[in-house]
Amino acid sequence: MNDQPTLDRMDRQILSVLQKSGRITNADLALRVNLSASACHRRVQRLEQAGVIRDYVALLDARKLGHATTVFVEIKLSGQADELLDAFERAVARVPAVLECHLMAGAADYLLKVAVSDTEDYAQIHRQYLARLPGVAQLTSSFALKTVFKTTALPV
């Protein structure tokens, strides 16, 4: 069953604008996509109800909040039993500084994105949390030297 709603050109224009300007007023959004305010509002509501628009957030500057270092952590588990994967996923969701966790195909079982202030901060997160996660057999950490490109906008 396909759970993807049908999106027309206008829906895609609305989504494109909202991804870049989430605080835009409905009136300004309607002007940008050449719709009446009421029609625009109905479309946005439909996109929200369909779950296409999941949430509205403020994107923060990690550097200004003291989290200037991004670490990507590859994790190999000791096994693949459902119970172990479930326990790992529940535990990793509670680790401070972990921004993302992805179940992977390939050499690593999971890939984490972690935001920390510096290498000492990461060492503490590693010792207190990551190394103690259920089933961890191996951790490989890679420090980002520079963010060349970053976006939260999906192609629509």
Image: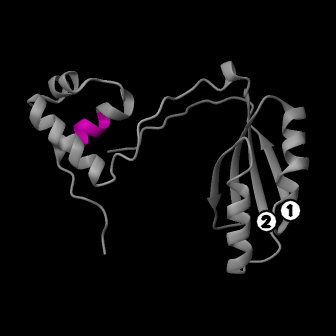
Task: Identify the image quadrant of the C terminus.
Answer: top left
| Residue sitting nearer the eye, 121 or 13 | 121
Quarter of the image holding residue 119? top right
Q: Is residue 106 above or below residue 147?
A: below
Question: Is 148 on the left or on the right of 5, as rendered?
Answer: right
Q: Residues within 10 Å of mark 2 (few under 14, many from 20)?
A: some
Q: Is residue 58 above or below residue 55?
A: above
- Which labelled disc corresponds to residue 127? none
Please provide percent x and percent y for residue 62: 65, 26
- The residue beneath circle 2 is 76
Please provide percent x and percent y for residue 52: 33, 50
Cα–Cα gap, marks 1 and 2? 5 Å
Quarter of the image holding residue 30? top left
Secondary structure state at the residue bearing disc 1? strand
- Which labelled disc corresponds to residue 138? 1
SS assignment for the magenta stretch, majority = helix
| Residue sitting nearer the eye, 49 or 61 | 49
Q: Is residue 14 above or below residue 73?
A: above
Q: Is residue 123 above or below residue 3?
A: above
Quarter of the image holding residue 27? top left
Q: Residues within 10 Å of mark 1 (few under 14, many from 20)?
A: few
Q: Reply yes or no: does residue 2 show up in magenta.
A: no
**Magenta span of residues:** 12-16
What's the residue at 60%, 23% (across, down)?
61
Question: Is 2 on the left or on the right of 114, as rendered?
Answer: left
Secondary structure state at the residue bearing disc 2? strand
What's the residue at 30%, 61% (across, down)?
4
Mark 1 is on which residue type? Gln
Tag 2 or tag 1, which sits nearer the N-term? Answer: 2
Mark 2 is on which residue type? Lys
